[in-house]
Image (cartoon, rainbow, N blue to C red):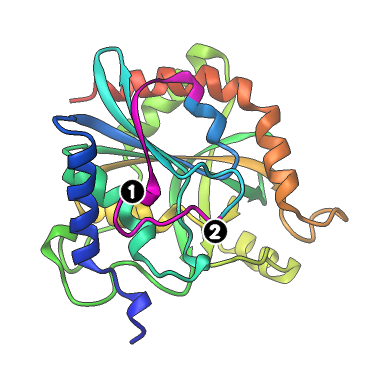
Amino acid sequence: MNNLMLVDMKVLEMAANDVKMHFPGAKPFGAFVLGSGWGDAIKVFNIKKEVSYSEIAGFGKAGVIGHAGKLSLVDFSGKEFFVFQGRRHFYEGEGWTPVVLPAYIAKQSGASILFLSNAAGGTTHKPGELMIITDHINHMGSNPLIGPHHQDLGPRFPDMSNTYNKDLINVMETIGRKVGVKLVKGVYLACSGPNYETPAEIRFFKQIGADAVGMSTIPEAMAANSMGMKVAGISCITNYCAGMTNQPLSHKEVVDTLNSVMGNIHKLIPEIVKAFSEIK
């Protein structure tokens, strides 16, 4: 099997040690991964310290426009929280190791919650809507848990029945109502990318229950769930999927749509993080 398909545990351990060196004494209760176009959300936090991904073993440079490639330790109401400004993607061709680093680093740093965000195409929801992920369909053709079993990544056969924690989902719904931001719910499907999907693929995905389609999030969710973390996820629906309109798909549309709803994200995220920090 191609080694890129296998997580390199030595690199993960080196990365966790690098983070402990850069953030000595840090005790984050959770971590937030900012997906495509979500970078501006960092402005709602009080940053104590930030480090470039290039200073963390195995991370390398984020390969997508709009991903800052920094790890920040933020202070929120007296509690610490990691924010990963950008993620690595499987389609970048460097394997699963950099993709699952945020989940592993968060777990090894003592965090119990992994909060994931992404930009996605919608099959049942409209551009500009924020969708709480309730479940997922892995259509990436691979899985970061493949390979020799590593106890640090959890059991050999992890249960995925409740990958997206119901308590966290309820919290997000409550916060949405509190701050007046509409939240929808749905199933997220991920392909490997980097191409957008064909109209025929989208018709199939819609038939099997996908409400949103993207190229990320699921690997981190699987790894975090396997390691015993509570997982939450929000997709910003940035466009209709292929074949649903006559509009060609582009990354510019993704970023433009997210910018248009950033005001709602700025209202929502601090309240969600605060509520997450109070969960025992």
- Residue tagged 2: 215
Where residue 162 appears, as percent x and y from the top left, is: 31, 48
Seen at 33% across and 67% down, the residue is 144
Compared to residue 60, the image places residue 83 above or below, namely above
Q: Nearer the viewer, mark 2 or mark 1?
A: 1
Span of residues in magenta: 43-63
Name the amino acid type tagged 1. Answer: Glu
Seen at 51% across and 50% down, the residue is 187
Compared to residue 177, the image places residue 115 above or below, namely below
Label 2 neighbour load within 10 Å: few <14, some 14-19, many 20+: many
Q: What is the number of the mark on residue 55?
A: 1
Residue placed farthest to the bottom in the image? Answer: 1
Where residue 84 appears, as percent x and y from the top left, is: 40, 40
With 100 as the anchor, is 193 left or right in this view?
A: right
Compared to residue 24, the image places residue 203 above or below, namely below
Seen at 36% across and 53% down, the residue is 220
Name the amino acid type tagged 2. Answer: Met
